[in-house]
Amino acid sequence: MAQAMLDDFKHALVNQNLAASGQCLVQMAQYIGWDEVAFNADISNHHLPVDEKGQYLARSMGWSPDILTEWENRRLAEDCPVTQACKRTMAPFYWDVGGSEAWDVGALREEQKNALRHYSSYSGAGVTVPVHRPQGRAAYVTWISRSKDQAQQLYSDHRDLLFLAAHYYVQWFDERYDHIQPEKPSDKVNLTARELECLTWASRGKTEEEIGMILGRSQATSRFHLRNAISKLNASNRTHAVAKACSMGLISSCF
């Protein structure tokens, strides 16, 4: 049964874009019995993964903009006990929002407790599968339940399946979409106000001609600023530049 579920999951991912892949992960989680699922592409990067359009991947997985905005603005990943635990183990682990036993860190700091309080609005417990890659990079998939008892039972019943599905998803992600993911903010990226303005309008779907009209400039001028931004961000095209600018916090049209 577990192998059939995993095979179906693999088949569903074939030729999907990133947003659709997140929906596949959600369907897998719900079929097993989890209420939510979360994915982090790089635990050393405190920005959330984005899709091809620069929108948070978690949006396609059912997470609300308010939850994601709070996560980013309060920089909860820096104090998240789940993220910290992923740095210490390669094995799946159960956790809940009510105690510190699962974290193996002793008494939690107040900042860590605040991160758990953030979780408590939509979860009771979960199972996180760390996925460590070469060069020291690590990702994780977290399967979430509103019930602690249910989470423990699902973990007991499906530990191997959760482990394999998480590892397969990260492998699939790395092969196709890792290049568009958030990068750590860099002081070396110094976009002008006009370049940021053009990128912001591009993130809202405006063409070069439309951007020129909005700014009272020619299409050639808007193209010039966009090309400069693409070059400074070391991006391959306009979409890639928008995704990188959003993930680095340079523009705020990620929703």
Image (cartoon, rainbow, N blue to C red):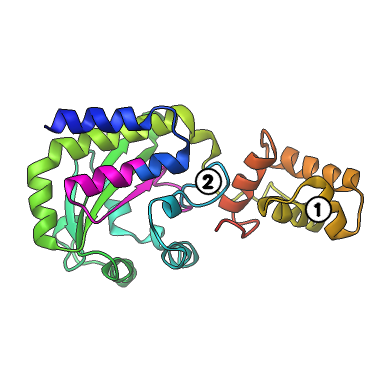
On the rendered structure, is 82 left or right of 32?
A: right
Write down the residue under mark 1. Answer: 211
**Residue at x-position 44% and y-position 54%:** 59
**Residue at x-position 25% and y-position 35%:** 165
Observer-nearest of 75 and 194: 194
Observer-nearest of 12 and 155: 12
* Residue 157 % position (x, y): 8, 43
Dot 1: what SS? helix
For marks 1 and 2 on the same chain, the one whose residue lies earlier in the sequence: 2
Q: Which mark is residue 182?
A: 2
For the C terminus, give its image quadrant: bottom right
Q: Quadrant of residue 31?
A: top left
**Residue at x-position 81% and y-position 52%:** 210
On the rendered structure, is 1 left or right of 241?
A: left
- In magenta, the rendered stretch is 24-47
Few, some or many residues within 10 Å of mark 1 (<14, 14–19, 20+):
many
Is 32 drawn above or below residue 123 in the view shown? above
Give the amino acid type for the residue marked by disc 1 in the picture.
Answer: Ile
* Residue 174 % position (x, y): 43, 31
Whether residue 31 is in magenta: the answer is: yes
* Residue 185 % position (x, y): 58, 51
Mark nearest the camera among 1 and 2 is 1
Dot 2: what SS? loop
